[in-house]
Image (tube, rainbow, N blue to C red):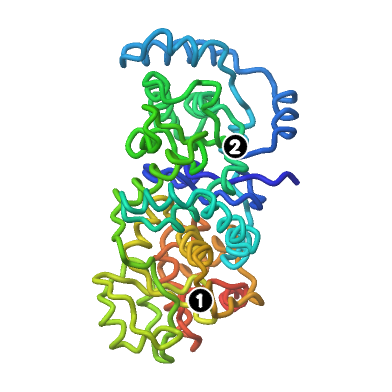
Amino acid sequence: MRRMLTTPLLLALLAGCQASPPSEASVAEEAEPGAGETTVAMAEAVANEPAAPADFASWLAGFRREARAEGIREATLSRALDGLRYRPRVIEFDRSQPEFVRPIWQYLDSAVSANRVTTGRERLDRHRATAREMERRYGVPAEVIVAIWGIESNYGSNFGNFSTLEALATLAYDGRRRDFARGELLAALRILDAGDISPERMQGSWAGAMGHTQFIPSSFEAYAVDGDGDGRRDIWGSIPDVMASTANYLDRAGWQAGQPWGVEVRLPDDFDYAETELSTRRPSRDWDERGVSTLDGAPLPDFDASSVIVPGGAKGPAFLVGPNFRAILRYNNATSYALAVGTLADEIAGREGVVQSWPRAEQPLSRSQVREMQRLLNQRGFEVGAPDGIMGPNTRRGLREFQAAIGTTPDGFATLKLLERLRP
């Protein structure tokens, strides 16, 4: 099996929601369908791809007229669109949805591996002056900037070999969210028209995410920064531009300078796990009064609005997370991603990573098993909505109600054991 990246636009397309974040957690060891194939694999894929659909050329001609009407210069259109290929491989990725989703501890094993920590420290040492300058400008710690770089593209070693233009044109013609991809393709043309990058160098994931920290074109337009003062925003080749753009994104997402992303905590035996949702926000002092404490007995971080999360259930680690965790979620709206960025940044900076053990003996559910669980919960009167195979807040709430009814800790963490209890 080829090892590939996953991307942000992929999540947006799968979820059917507007994608403001520039990226999905792009872990080089990830084995699910995704973005950054190796050069050899790409060559094989191109050689084996069938011809473009007969009407792709006419669609492209119509899009070209639209782009011209939007003010894109003819010279840019010629450089960008002449000879543009339809990529069937992109559609294969767009329409694939893996049945099995890795548990968070396996994801973190890859995202925060010893090698990634060591490489992150080396990259921070190599680019320390640049990273510290961006920290001074935007208030985002240098290690957080480097951590996002590491998770998105393994520090630039794998940010994808697809032409962004070809990927987005294919998705706009034949993808499941065509209007969204069409808008991103127009944004990509505006970037080319501004002279930030050439069409040949505009490469990235199959889903249209670009460069070292995987911005989609609309996010590039909104947040990319010229960090080295050469008049261009180059997130493919300029590390100052990469770091400035990433820090600017987090700053604009609400990063609070001087605050941590969160802290690992210990919960009291009588803790109400219905409170463990990101939508539940309380001042740190309220959590302290409820018996939440740090592992070493130090005071909780002083958050005005913080949440307790238990991504591995009651048997796994617990975390108190604040506004900066939510800022990372703006970059990629996945709890596992934000936790990976935070813990990788901590370890790059020499702080301790996750201490408490994950429930590795538990067997998480596949998507079809989650759908079965949802159906069975509905049948028993624990309403969770239409079965979709996704463990969202409604499903966790219904599962907690079922757990309370059978006398187990109501943490909303889905396991095979609970599914078996639900089955007739």
Image quadrant in which you'd find residue 121: bottom right
**In terms of secondary structure, where does tag 2 sit?**
loop
- Amino acid tagged 1: Gly
- In this view, which residue lies farthest toward the front? 129
**The image quarter in which residue 270 lies:** bottom left
Check disc 1 and report the residue beneath it.
Answer: 313
Q: Position of residue 291 (x, y in %)?
A: 35, 89
Q: Residues within 10 Å of mark 1 (few under 14, many from 20)?
A: many
Return the residue at label 2.
160
User: Where 353 sits versus 191, above or below?
Assistant: below
Q: Tell me what residue is drawn at x 34 percent, y 46 percent.
A: 248
* Amino acid bearing label 2: Gly
Do the residues under discs 1 and 2 have CB atoms within 8 angstroms?
no
- Please say if 400 is above or below 72: below
Q: Give residue 209's position: percent from left, percent from top.
A: 49, 37
Which residue of the protein is positioned furthest toward the bottom in this rendering?
269
Q: Is residue 172 above or below residue 400?
A: above
In front of the other: 77 or 155: 155
Query: Which image quarter is the C terminus in?
Result: bottom right
Along the line of sight, the residue nearer the viewer: 103 or 382: 103
Q: Nearer the viewer, mark 1 or mark 2?
A: 2
Q: Residue at x 62, y 39 (%)?
A: 36
Q: Position of residue 49 (x, y in %)?
A: 70, 24
In the image, 128 versus 375, the foreground residue is 128
Which residue is located at x 32 percent, y 76 percent?
301
